[in-house]
Image (tube, grey):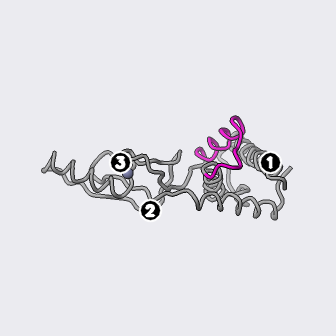
Amino acid sequence: MKLTEYEQEYLEKFFDDGSYRVESEPEHWIHGGDEGFSYCQKCCEKEVKRLTAENPAEEYSVDGGWKIEGDNTPYCEKCGKLLENTLTDYGCEVEIDHFLTNGFDVTSDLDRRSMSEVISSGGWEPFARQLFKNEDERENTLNYFDDLHRLCRSILIKIGK
Ligand SMILES: [Zn+2]
């Protein structure tokens, strides 16, 4: 059964409250280097210095500092710090599957942060006028939101709401 708007708001607040307690910072990467690697700002600056010293002919610089889309939550390549992005539809699906399979820990701020990211990235409903490429895509999207509401219903029950 779909969550009511009141239940959605309640859960958003619950997820956000956990999320605020988790330290994170904007994602950075190295312009001119391998942009597939993510860093916190400090480590990115260090890596730019190191690479520039190694290859003086190349131009490296710190890039990023804003949210880009990613299939998963980024961590700093060097120090492991949690970084911020926006999850793709695929990234949201992976998180929901993970929690449906492994369970959601209502006492974990990290789990709450993950769901806060899922909601802020993918929302509660498909866009009202969303166009689908084909029937598979339509079905996949509707299944995703069914799973999301099923998971969130179970979380509400766990927190006694
Ligand atoms: Zn770092």
Magenta segment: does it hold 101?
A: yes
Q: Name the residue under label 2.
A: 66
> Under tag 2, what secondary structure?
loop
Residue placed farthest to the right in the image?
1
**Residue at position x 41%, y 48% in the image:** 76
Relative to residue 155, is residue 102 depicted above or below?
above
- The foreground one among 106 and 100 is 106
The answer to whether 53 appears left or right of 149 in the picture is: left
Q: Name the residue under label 1.
A: 158
Relative to residue 101, is residue 81 depicted above or below?
below
Q: Determine contact: label 3, label 2, CB under 8 Å.
A: no
Query: For the residues carrying marks 1 and 2, which lies nearer the camera in this image?
Result: 1
What predominant SS class does the magenta segment belong to?
Answer: helix
Q: Name the residue under label 3.
A: 35
Which residue type carries mark 3? Glu
How far is the residue under mark 1 from the one under mark 2? 35 Å
N-term-proximal mark, 3 vs 2: 3
In x, y percent, where is residue 93? 64, 43
**Residue at position x 51%, y 57% in the image:** 23
Magenta segment: does it hold 42?
A: no
Magenta segment = 90-109
- The foreground one among 43 and 31 is 43
How far is the residue under mark 3 from the one under mark 2? 14 Å
Query: For the residues carrying marks 3 and 1, which lies nearer the camera in this image?
Result: 1
N-term-proximal mark, 1 vs 2: 2
